[in-house]
Amino acid sequence: MTDNNTGIDRRIRKSKMALKESLISLMQSKDFREISITDIVELADLNRGTFYKHYQYKEELLEEVMEDVIADLIISYREPYKNAKTFTINELTASVIKIFEHVANHANIYTLILKSNAWPTLLERICNELKKLPVEDLEDYRPNPKINKELASSYQAYAILGMIIEWVNTGFKYSADYMAEQLLEILNNKSVNAVFKINHFKQK
């Protein structure tokens, strides 16, 4: 590829990134239906012609933002085993768990998902990815043959999503590293033979 083409590609990426960041910023305070293309390009300091070089409608821009999030989610989820032939949870280190870094990098979007109706379908898509990735990527996903692998993957997906939701709702109270460490501790905490003391409660 020539330097000229490289420069053009760089400008395209820069323009599209500016448009995406503009849309996300506007959605912090306005309903998507109320946001115009003029609003988007003015905040991005671009002209309408630049917008129409890449997108026909603002919905296409929104869809690309969503696809970017999903693509990055998949990359971050696969990080612990991307170059491995086998995958053992109790040999994992927190440093290779990148899903919380992904959430932190897209903090504005995750906050919008959970605290507004901006992306009603994106949370469902994220959950579906979290459910299907271990089933598709990992052989012998269920070490216990009595366990239904679809139910097991759903259990894990909602557990991870629950941690993400709690993290967002607390205003990202903890660091991404701490969240990864906690996930690893939870995964390694075998409760099969655990004995729990009951907190007795008074009947009403």
Image (cartoon, rainbow, N blue to C red):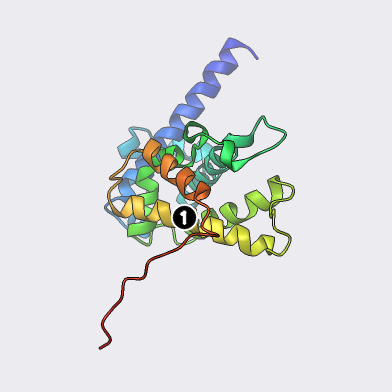
Task: Quarter of the image for the C terminus: give it.
Answer: bottom left
Q: Is residue 9 left or right of residue 58?
A: right
Q: Residue under circle 1?
A: 161
* Residue at 34% from the left image edge and 35% from the top image edge: 44
Out of 131 and 28, give the one closest to the viewer: 131
Out of 39 and 13, give the one closest to the viewer: 13
Q: Outermost residue toward the bottom?
A: 204
SS of the residue under disc 1: helix
* Residue at 48% from the left image edge and 53% from the top image edge: 160
Residue 18, compared with residue 158, is above or below; it is above
Badge 1 amino acid: Leu
Q: Is residue 55 left or right of residue 140?
A: left
Q: Is residue 38 left or right of residue 139?
A: left
Out of 37 and 85, give the one closest to the viewer: 85
Query: What is the tally of numbered marks visible in this picture?
Result: 1
How crowded pointer 1 is (Cα within 10 Å; few <14, some 14-19, many 20+) is rated as some
* Residue at 55% from the left image edge and 23% from the top image edge: 9
Residue 118 appearing in the image: yes
Image position, residue 12 (x, y; %): 50, 28
Image position, residue 143 (x, y; %): 69, 53
Image position, residue 22 (x, y; %): 35, 40
